[in-house]
Image (cartoon, helix red, strand yellow):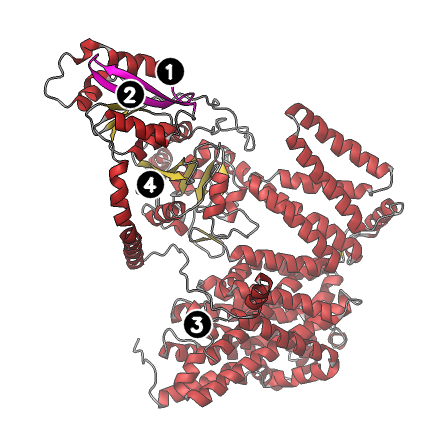
Amino acid sequence: MPIFQSIKDFLSYKEPPNVDQFELLEDETEEDERSTERKQDSNAQRGPDSQQNSSSAAENNISNILQQNRLKIEQEFNLPKNKDIIVRDIQIGKNTDAFIVFVDGMVDNTTINDYILRPLMAENNFDNIGEERSIDYIIKNVLSVNQVNKATTFNECITQILKGLTALFVQNCREGILIESRGFEKRNVEQPVTETVISGPHEAFTENLRTNLTLVRKIIKNKDLITEMLPVGKTNNISCGIMYIDGIANTKIVDELKRRIESIDIDFIMGDGMLNHLIEDHPFAIFPQILSTERPDRIASFLMEGKVVFICDGTPNASVVPITFFHMFHTSEDSFLRWQYGTFIRLVRILAFWLAILLPGLYLAVTLYHTEIIPTELLLAIEMSRESVPFPVILEILLMEVSFELIREAGIRVPEVIGQTLGIIGALILGQAAVAANLVSPILIIIVSITGLGSFAMPNYHMGFAIRILKFMFIFLGFFAGFYGISFGIFIIGGMACSMKCFGVPYFTPIAPKTRVNPDIVIRQPIWKQSMRPDSLNSPNKKRSGRKVRGWAEKEKRGNRK
Amino acid sequence: MIREGKFGVQEAMWLTAATISSKVFYTSPGLITGIVGNSGWYMTLISMSIALLSFTFICLLLKRFPGKDIVAIFNDTMGGVVGFAFSGILGLYLLFLATSRVSEFTNVMKIYAFPLTPSVIIIGILTAGVIILCILGLEALARFTKLAVYALLVGYVLVLILGVQNYDINNLFPIFGYGADKVILNGILRSSAYGEIIILAVFAKSLQGIHHIKKAGYISLIVSGIIISLSLLAFSLTFPYYSTLEITAPMYHMATLIDYGRFVQRVETVFLFIWFISSFISVTAVFYCITSIYCKLFRIQDAKPIIAGSAVIFFSIAVIQVNIGVAAEQTIQITRQYGWIPPFALPLISLLTAMLRKKGVVSHE
């Protein structure tokens, strides 16, 4: 039956649903409508669930009977089966029963022993308790920990306990105390692995969300830098921090990002890589639509442009939206170099992009269909080198390209020291041997090497993958129809890319469509000329700098005139 | 819902300019020489002026019906039946335009680049590209054009500059070709060369108001006029008039003559990219217009299912045109003499009718 259904679906026509795509429009009325609709939707969703919620709310609330609370905690954490959840019974001030709960290994033992248990159990700390509610008294006078919060529900407590906090439950109290005690093992801040630079900072994100947020805050010391936290993954419940600068970022983008993340209904999300797949506009497109970086300085510059960043706990990367095609060619080093050098390396990257995508396909097209383009001497050289090769050019090129991909993949999987050796062995010995054995022509080794270098020159790892896949497509198109096939490929891929949007911003902005932007797309002009934020983001604060960026130069000019 | 998307003046301008001027890569320049001698380069400027004047009438018509496209305007001004017929004629004209362009493209390709490849393969690849881009939408096509046009222009200018070595000013004389009267008359008649400007009226809703349409239309006509005129000038400067009649694709041929030493020669293959991509763009734009007119005529809300069916018809007509060869070429040339009627005369009739019947909004700006 499913086969018949599939055939029927294929043959019959269903009118597509009239869905409004998210667009960054400037009119406010539409925003109002959207927010009203959203509110209505959320109300509608809340409606049928509200009764269920009220019945379960009572169970979820913390009781004033300590034993009940303990039973609930044991039940929720599957105790005593679950061995790394520790429940420690204590007597506060030697007269009130209480217990603390924490996850072994995620907490700092010193904090628990010296700053939670010791003060709680000391009798003299409760001498002046008076009329005040015991829970408030404990928070204000006993616990010497920097972050302490009250919680009224078990859900809140459980979520925080799993994040490394310690929960304190006290007899005759309807509230629990959540005490900051995180102290799990984490990697130190190290150098970036895939985005190394020569000039500029050498810090990279780690797997710890708090560290990553701090690394960004260390660069942008601004009170308007907002960090909102959202839980993602229904079962693994990791935290996702959304960062933006209030007054610079467009709130529509922030709302849209939150809407997309909140609507995700999946049990497990490992980090921003998985989250990106779930929130990007065109999941079937070959080009990356969300920029992922491991550099805090890059994130800081994106935030200053008005973009929105999200960082997930557990991965050493941060993601940025909305981005365009041209961001894939930028590195943070461009900003640290003089503008002439920055422009030059960008032009080199663009050349690398085209070489990596088209060179093997063009070689095939030229040798098979358009030999007249090759000067006679070069043609003779190519023909002589190919004379003893028994394979057709397509097979020859595929053989080398596949070998190259194997070397690259193997080089990443093996330990670092062997990886480098493997690269050299693969590139030199395999290539040399292939030529000696007359399996491939020497000119092809040059073609494949340049293609490989081109893809390595891509600053964005994900874009590198897109290029590697597209390269094979262009090889087949060049083989099938020469330059005509390659033109067809450019037309199709270009058209597909032009139809893409990232959070309402067209992928080829600011060239197609043309929008006002800083002179920092391909050609990077001097920094004092980069006075505007991208128009495509509709930022509430479009100006980055004042009129006299180089005040001293203006003064000197005025002085000379006098 | 028919979603043609929104795009700006620049995208619309370059899309129209690329659609109009891509014909310089085909047989047209050679045929113009046959009609007016070596004065084709300024004859086309006369055609452009007529097209500019005619476009003014199209703008006046669009101004009377803000927010409406040409199909809806024909319907409003001429009534259901005549309006339907007008739009139908326009659709058929565009279909003819698209298929004749494909057949020209295929013939030139077979002569110069792929002599052994069957026509069906060449047309098939082109049709596949057209289908995919039409599914992606007009917005994507307009943006791609805007993006590609820089590279196309660089390549085009490069061919013109590198061809300087073969230019001979004496080839331009006699300056009036077969006579000034013939130049003017043919200039007026062959204003159909700029007939693709009508696509702006078909996609009027995608542009933000009449000011944008006006701007895009006038600039694109002037830009395409300059491109066509420069091509014809370069071509006339390169080849003596008696040999031009024999050349199928003069621009391509011109590129083959470029020779700067042993290495920089035979650059026509690079020129192929400009030729292919501009052909893809122009055929797709015209084809999208056909499907759009069809959907609007029959009030079909979703254009996507129509695209594949229309492409089959388009493919079949193109294959037939290629197969009947010379006969089709003759028909194309004769029809081009009267090709100005659907894009320019029909909107003018519609405008006059609207004025007489007092239809639409009268602006007193």
Same chain for the residues under marks 2 and 1 in the image: yes
- Horizontally, is B259 left or right of B59 in the view? right
N-term mark: 2 or 1: 2
Q: Which amino acid lies under the numbered mark 1 shown in the image of this protein?
A: Asn
Residue at 68% across, 40% down: A452
Give the residue displayed 55% in from the left and 78% down from the top.
B46
Foreground of the two, B152 or A148: A148
Say whether marks 4 and 2 touch (CB < 8 Å): no
Magenta span includes A94: yes
The residue singled out by tag 4 in the image is A546
Q: Residues within 10 Å of mark 4 (few under 14, many from 20)?
A: few
Badge 4 amino acid:
Gly
Chain of residue at mark 3 = B
- Element type at marker 4? loop
Residue carrying label 3: B204
Tell me which segment is drawn in magenta.
A83-108
Please identify the quarter of the rendering in which residue B76 is found. Answer: bottom left
**Residue A454 has which mark?**
none
Would you name the residue on which mark 2 appears? A99
Pinpoint residue B355: horizontal percent, then vertical percent: 36, 87
Residue underneath mark 1? A109
